[in-house]
Image (spheres, rainbow, N blue to C red):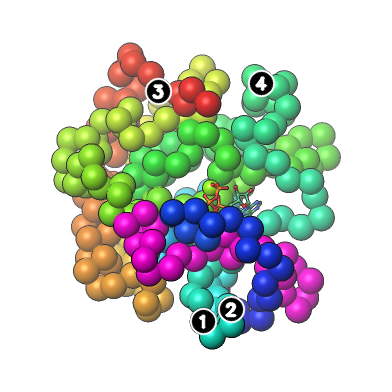
Amino acid sequence: MTDASWKLIDKWKNKPQGQVWRVRDARGRSGFFKFAYPEQWYNAGPLVGNEWIATALAEKLHLPCASVEITELTDGPHCLHGIVSLPRQGVHLFSWNRAPEQIRTNPPHYLRDFDHLLDVIAFDVWLTNIDRGSGKNIILYRDHAMYNWYLIDHAYCAYGCDRKWQPAKWTELYWKQVWQFYHIPRGWLQFIKPERLLRAAQKIAALPERSIAELIATVPDPLYSQSIKDQVTTMLLTRKQELGEILTTWIHYQGTKESRV
Ligand SMILES: Nc1ncnc2c1ncn2[C@@H]1O[C@H](COP(=O)(O)OP(=O)(O)OP(=O)(O)O)[C@@H](O)[C@H]1O
Ligand SMILES: [Mg+2]
């Protein structure tokens, strides 16, 4: 996952939670280089490590994600450590929230494997991802008569950032009450099949503990410090056992579960 040949095209986004620069490599591939300056820690946390571990875990669950490459980019005197998210090349890409109305109102008809996309709810809840509801982080593209999808932007998964834990520490009830921190994209609720969602939770629960611990241990230095690795390991191993119960509570919850945007 490491490659040092990326060159800056433009400094596209500069936000409290990190930078996104457009980059290109010698092979002509384009990418989105994400990183944060040390002074952005409160809002950004170890975003590169979060992206890396979430992508690796999604792979284990066969959830299509953008490929990512850890890289260093030189900007004047600075050597920046970040991650490049690779867009699918040669196709027109758009995010779920920008999809035509007919796709958003009848996704099973237009999207390949929409049921599997709904499994992302179990994944996000496991990783306490607070950033899916807007639909910006689900990318679609046309493939013959249907649309394919893949996931991007896992900066707020797992450790996230210190700001994420302001409402409550990961051990508190707040993070078991999904509606407090997570909304599904607008329009999805009618398509959720509880048995399927609970099966997705079971698949996560069935991931061998050792394989998760080993994966977290291999997050490259210095993306996660040892104490962050320890916290993320305990958190993910604990939450995977509780996931069925957490999702059952959410399924029965009668309040707002969909994003309003
Ligand atoms: N692999 C990818 N495929 C398609 N688009 C991508 C990919 N990676 C990043 N992008 C685009 O770059 C934008 C910014 O990337 P990302 O979401 O990871 O960062 P962000 O800091 O959350 O920015 P934003 O607030 O725009 O979401 C995305 O919203 C998307 O438009
Ligand atoms: Mg984003």
Three-letter amino acid code of the residue under disc 2: Asp
Residue 257 badge: 3
Structural distance between the alpha carbons of marks 2 and 1 = 5 Å
Task: Using the rendered image of the protein, determine whether residue 188 is visible from the camera's viewpoint.
Answer: no
Q: Is mark 3 within 8 Å of ligand 2?
A: no
Up/down of 225 relative to 131, above or below: below
Mark 3 to mark 4: distance in Å?
Answer: 19 Å
Is residue 21 one of those drawn in magenta?
yes
In the rendered structure, which segment of residues is drawn in magenta?
20-45
Give the CA separation, mark 3 to mark 2.
42 Å
Amino acid tagged 4: Asn
Residue at mark 2: 75
Closer to the eye: label 3 or 2 = 2
Relative side of 213 to 154, left or right: left
* Amino acid on which disc 3 is placed: Lys
Q: Reading the chain from its start, which is encountered first: label 3 or label 2?
A: 2
Marks 4,1: beta carbons within 8 A: no
Look at the numbered disc 4 and say if its residue's Cβ is closer than 8 Å to ligand 1.
no
- The residue mark sitting in front, 3 or 1, is 1
User: How far from the left and from the top, in percent, is residue 232?
Assistant: 27, 59
**Mark positioned earlier in the residue sequence (3 or 1):** 1
Numbered tag placed on residue 106 in the rendering: 4
Please tell me which of labels 3 and 4 falls first in the chain: 4
Element under disc 2: strand
Q: CA distance from mark 2 to mark 4?
A: 45 Å
Is label 4 in a helix, a strand or a loop? loop
Marked residue nearer the N-terminal end (4 or 1): 1
Q: SS at mark 3?
A: loop
Q: Residue furthest top?
A: 254
Q: Give the camera-side residue of 74 and 183.
A: 74
